[in-house]
Amino acid sequence: MAAASKTNPSQPRHSRDVTQWDLETDVAIVGFGGAGGCAAIEAADAGSEVRIFELASASGGSTALSSAEIYMGGGGGTRVQRASGFEDSTEDMFQFMMACAGPQADEAKIRNYCERSVEHFEWLVDIGVPFKDSFLDERAIMCLTDDGLLFTGNEKAYPFSTLAKPCPRGHNLYVEGDNGGPLFMKIVTENVDKRDNIHVHYESRALTLIVDDSDEVVGLVVRENQRELNVRARGGVILCAGGFVMNREMVAKHAPKLTQGTEPIGNPGDTGSGIQMGMAVGGAAINMHEGFISLPFYPPASMTYGIAVNDKGQRFINEDVYHGRLGDFVLRQPSERIYLILSVEHYADYEQVSYLGAPVAGTGETVAELEQELGLRGGVLAHTLATYNEDCAAGEDTLFHKAPQWLQALEPPLVALDLTPGRGAFVPHFTLGGLDTLPTGEVVDEQRRPIPGLYAAGRTACGVVRRAEGYASGMSVGDATFTGRLAGQQAARRGG
Amino acid sequence: MAAASKTNPSQPRHSRDVTQWDLETDVAIVGFGGAGGCAAIEAADAGSEVRIFELASASGGSTALSSAEIYMGGGGGTRVQRASGFEDSTEDMFQFMMACAGPQADEAKIRNYCERSVEHFEWLVDIGVPFKDSFLDERAIMCLTDDGLLFTGNEKAYPFSTLAKPCPRGHNLYVEGDNGGPLFMKIVTENVDKRDNIHVHYESRALTLIVDDSDEVVGLVVRENQRELNVRARGGVILCAGGFVMNREMVAKHAPKLTQGTEPIGNPGDTGSGIQMGMAVGGAAINMHEGFISLPFYPPASMTYGIAVNDKGQRFINEDVYHGRLGDFVLRQPSERIYLILSVEHYADYEQVSYLGAPVAGTGETVAELEQELGLRGGVLAHTLATYNEDCAAGEDTLFHKAPQWLQALEPPLVALDLTPGRGAFVPHFTLGGLDTLPTGEVVDEQRRPIPGLYAAGRTACGVVRRAEGYASGMSVGDATFTGRLAGQQAARRGG
């Protein structure tokens, strides 16, 4: 049995084995993405000395790689929502987010997130994050204009639309193009840099936590310039080290369904080391099997006029859902192929705009011809289309409840795109499991007792968002920045 | 922050805090069900002194509550298989079990299980477990005759039938009625009792593990007669304490899909304490979200002539699958209701034999009438039935590949049973997640490094069976008894 290395994230160091503290601080933060940056600002503003240990040579994390949409609302609406004519209610936001998380929902966490969301918006504005008071009324995955607000999830889609009044909550930074992430992290980094009580260590790898005899987390071990340093953290350690999508072994073990994705979304540091460090001191990891997995079949929005069918020729979803919900439903279909059936007119839009990359699986001047090209049993797709077209004429999708605005009869000639994961389409994915935490960021063990001195935020924690089928863009950066702030406040308080 | 109790399973005791060893043994085993009993026999036969700590006042565990079918085969066939005319191959068994576990498969574990399965059969015979050399050719959930062999899974159902040559592997004890479990545990207990080097402690609750400064497991704390005892285990501790289906909080947190089940299957001790003890010393828990969940829609076998449909009126599965696979597919359907459509003739069988308990959702002298009673959109179920009946006439289920023997046109009058979980049907379930182990039973950490001195078997470990959709009766007791034996051998070897 090989002796375990003492600097492996899955094995904490004991303080009795620490002969010297190389660094001391009030609050130590692992990772300088959106969560870590916001945690540092809050802890510093509460008077603490803060050190951030970032593996890379610059700040950014996965937040900088994202569009940095931020999911916020409730409380009568953020400034942008109100200016755009939306009076959002906390209860609607809460009901919607509870439905998104389903049986995995952490009610206290979602409640807290919704109740303090407008305040979070204002804090972001205070640190200099710009939002334009305008609404983009488009079915988009990301905002390519500088508009401040858009629908980014399933709010308007069945069944969510029946559970809570739909309201757009995706807040987009005031910048043209898909440039929200870099701008957001630039602003956060400037805020960090101008605070004298925050010290950033770049190219510093957090190796493992340090615990004392009463199992409190009292610091961590980092490696800088090939030297191991024992860091004492009086208030505690905040793990903001991202998820584990880049650790393919961990993905295969814990979230096997994500192995059907083609493109892991995240930064190279998303190796699960933060989650492992937390688990090693007794932190419970939850929801580890879940992930976001998507088939980004829009834009163009006109793809929504199509219907998704399985290899029996059956529909299985309302196609006006968010792309992550479609992705999840595709994986659940007992089917070897999934197709998106389009009119030639909408296929022309697809050719111009889409980045889905799904190949054409078949075409048909008639439905029978298309069935034959796809190798389907004759008659089922024909019946599916006949039923759908009848519903389109009546203005109500009786089977799957796609909203009336997307109902347009599908008449031949038709084109079928192959949406099957693994056959050409772009299938982005990332993990949604992590350390279980209290709403305020304390990492808890299997019995939900906090581990003194340990906090987690962002993707290292399991946050408000728990399932691809209920995902909305902006929930990750929203959760990371919000929970980072709370963890920063808590650790600062503890550090005295 | 409340100080953690030192006798909580999620917090190990340190050997430096042990002032006195109250008991010493070579091998300590937690739990006296099928896994624990077999572990004890093997460790004792290897010359070790063994102590079993069992919470209840008698042996049994969940094995005694089960039918104790045991999934075995390969290697040309067990004696019972060969006598019944089945020449099973290890490769067929391996391919089948790999498909059952899908992306979660532990290939090394399945390989080992299959390669040594005939040997395991012989070991069971050697300790006195009786199997009759006869085959029951029935679609049953459990064997109510004394026959020794039956099909207990998806072997003959699509797609499994295309991946490996179907062979029955469910071995049933030579006893009338559903009495295999008690008989099996009686035999195991007699074997334990006659070995002088096994000491059984009943009404003894394992509280937590004891680790030394190098993180080796060196013993455990038990409570007997309201007294805590420190038990030194020179060879190690084997956790055979069952799963966590009776810990509803843990189920909600880790396996939320199981909350849709009605009946937890297991014994009251299945509280996850064994898994938690292992996690507390760094053991990785895997596959925690998965469970067996079923709609036992047969017997009577004639239910297989029916078709299962969702609330759109669409079929979604070949109805000749094992009931657990149907259960899992039901949960994955985006549907508020699931129905089993039967002819009145087969409904009469249902009334006589079934213990499914599903209420009648609707009846119809015509398909249109049934659609109306069920509140379905008109025409879809009619088309589903027309397609199905056409396929029955041609002898091939073109859409879902139900085997030809179960194809019989469904003509009105028709009856629809409501299979929807939560609406009356019996939905048994249990957990399939647990501690990650090597094929030989060593508990491993997140990096798959063994934790010295710690073993797990049965439902406390994550074994060869990983998904309801690929479950077969007999895989649990098969895995528990087999892995129990291997863990017993390993711990004995280590104990010297």
Image: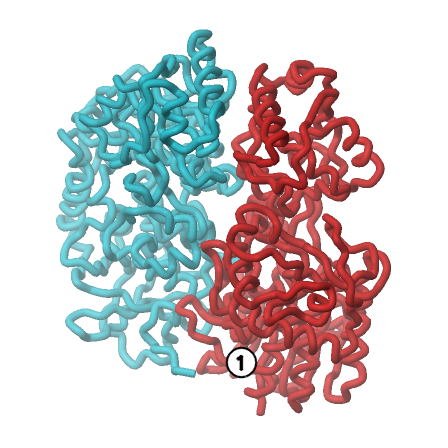
Chain colours: A red, B cyan
Residue at point 72%, 57% (across, down): A150
Helix, strand, or loop for circle 1? strand
Residue at which label 1 appears: A453
Question: Total of numbered circles in the picture?
Answer: 1
- Residue under the image location 60 percent in, 68 percent down: A74
Nearer to me, A63 or B211: A63
- For disc 1, the chain is A
Q: Tell me what residue is drawn at x 62 percent, y 27 percent.
A: A389
- Name the outermost residue toward the front: A394
Q: Amino acid at mark 1?
A: Gly
Q: Position of residue B416 (x, y in %)?
A: 33, 28
Toward the viewer: A142 or B355?
A: A142
Label 1 neighbour load within 10 Å: few <14, some 14-19, many 20+: many
Residue B343: percent from left, percent from top: 31, 19
Specify whether B235 is left or right of A258.
left
Give the percent coordinates (x, y) of residue B324: 37, 36
Q: Quadrant of the C terminus of chain B?
A: bottom left
Instruction: State whether residue A480 is above or below residue B495.
Output: below
Q: Quadrant of residue B6?
A: bottom left
Q: Does A267 appear above or below A59?
A: above
In the image, what residue occupies the spot 41% across and 72% down? Answer: B212
Q: Is residue A19 left or right of residue A84?
A: left
